[in-house]
Amino acid sequence: MIPRIQKRGQRTIGLLYYLYGPGKFEEHTDPHLVASWDHNAPDPGRDATATLQQLQQLLDQPVENIDQAQRPKKHVWHLSVRNGAEDRILTDEEWGDIARRMVAAAGIDDPETGAGCRWAAVRHADDHIHIVATLVREDGYKPDLDNDAARVQAQARALEVELGLRRLNKGDGTAAKRPTSAERHKAARQGRERTAREELRETVRRAVAGARSEEEFFDRLAGAGLLIRKRTAPSGDLLGYKVALPDDRNKDGEPVFYPGARLAPDLSLPRIRERWSGNAQDAPVPRPEDATRTGPSTPAAARRRTASAAWQAMLVIEHGDDAVAAAHIAAAGEILDALAKTSAAHTRRELRDAATAFERASRSHVRAVRGHDRALRQAARDLVHGGPALGRGEDGASTAMAIDMLFFLITAAAHWHAKKGHAQQAAAAARAAEHLRSAYQEAAAHPLVVLYQRGRRLNRPLLQRQTVVLREALPGLAEQILAEPGWYALAATIADAEAASHDPAALLSDAVERRELDTAESVSDVLVWRMRRMADLPADASELPAHGTTGGPSPTRRAAARASAPGQRRGGEGTVGKTR
């Protein structure tokens, strides 16, 4: 149940005309009263002798009874209460009871003293009502509406339980402003999938991901095709900005601009500037050794650095200071935005949905101390400057590696929010993790097939030796891993690590140390990517030489690999079909 207090107005009759009218798009059906302050207000919807003017005059009477100088400039209070699409259809009696409890909670009416304001609740659709009230009480005093929004939200949570409706998480005032009904209808008329507000929010988020200065930020906004207006002080200092879509116009043909703060609380210019704090005094972020192999600006190298940054950030979120953890969680949102922007077509939609879902989880009342999150922000910058990734080869495999690490980073963020009682943020992070799970399955399918085939072709003595290594390094997990189809991909990774002069037992131990694996559907898959990242092994193993194979066709032949890989013919039974 979603109660929303609308802007206060000056004309009671104007609002009544809308509530009892056909709506802007003929969406209103059978408008009628379900409750009122005295249980006896005239209903122009069901009573042919009643008029809107009569109802308006009765509602406004307490306002008219006091001196003009004492009347509030905007005396019309308006609350809409809406149920979810999956909720059952409530009766008029139930909606009437909801209305009475809402006005009592808000402070509009006080049934015990009888000295409340006059109000009426109108229903013109199955799933919601509107409550209109005038803000002068019967005794001439004005109502106490301090924290009315919080009080009606609390009443909604109680009603959800009592009426068996979908239970929503309590808000904390840090959410981005939702599109208005007018914005949604406008988007529908224009054939847009999303409203202008939502498109602008995503574009601005992507523009700020990894940006280091105002100049770079505004260059990215301009490059994305947005119209920009800057607000400056008399001194010439920049105070704020507004953005608009070139084709989003008002009735006068002028662009509709949105200030950054109206898109999301953390997209105001002062909050964006906080992300750049510490850039000047901090030392450059060391580049991992993989940059020497794949080049510092390639998509694959950027994804490997993203995986490394996510790996380190997990520990900070799990065990670090709250303010620093909040900064890392916010920076994780920049990573998701940058990855979605540069991803290949087959993972783009899920990564975009993950970034959109996580946007809500990137803010809370724990104020982030920026600067400590520079490794994640640098990774986001590398993703943007590395350019779009191909969905195959090292690009595709390193994408799977990055998504694998990000899945656990976002899961750690969900756990952190849950411990802090941030219900909406925890739920948003959990939704983002599910989108990452789907994106991972798409990205990891081919590289895991290649590794699986390499592992299946290892000779028996080598495979037995690696089994011993696994049991000695991870005695508590070994039997579970050996029972997974992904064991063969892990065996191939162990062989590659040995060939590169690494100690596989040490890598395995480090891969599980202080890192949760409870959310992994395939532990072997997780260890494959962690080991390949730590040992600086190519994520795409299709071109590596075989180690101790039993002969037969090349594992790089994709058709043969797919034909015999687990899960390819049995509905997701094996590693490729069931991951994370």
Image: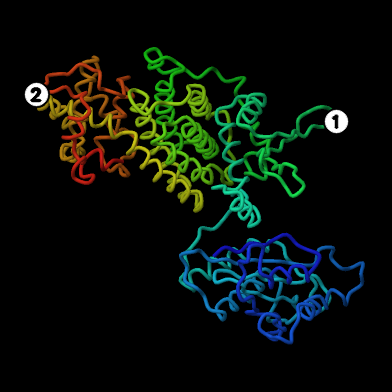
**Horizontal side of residue 34 vs 422, given as left or right:** right
**Residue 459, percent from left and from top:** 9, 23
Name which of mark 2 and mark 1 comes first in the sequence. Answer: 1
Q: Residues within 10 Å of mark 2 (few under 14, many from 20)?
A: some
Compared with 119, 243 (above or below) is above
Q: How many badges with numbers are in the image?
A: 2
Quadrant in which residue 276 is drawn:
top right
Q: Residue 306 occupies which quadrant of the picture?
A: top left
Residue 317's x, y, as percent? 46, 37
Looking at the image, residue 302 lies above or below residue 274: above
Q: Check contact, mark 2 vs mark 1: CB within 8 A.
A: no
Disc 1 marks which amino acid?
A: Pro
For the point 66% across and 28% down, the residue is: 218
Q: Which residue is mark 2?
A: 459
Between the residue at mark 2 and the residue at mark 1, the CA separation in whole angstroms equals 77 Å
Q: Residue at x 83, y 78 (%)?
A: 61
Image quarter (top left, top right, bottom left or bottom right) of the C terminus = top left
Q: Secondary structure at mark 1?
A: loop
Q: Position of residue 331 (x, y in %)?
A: 52, 34
Q: Quadrant of residue 23?
A: bottom right
Q: Which residue carries the number 1 mark?
A: 234
Q: Is residue 303 above or below residue 69?
A: above
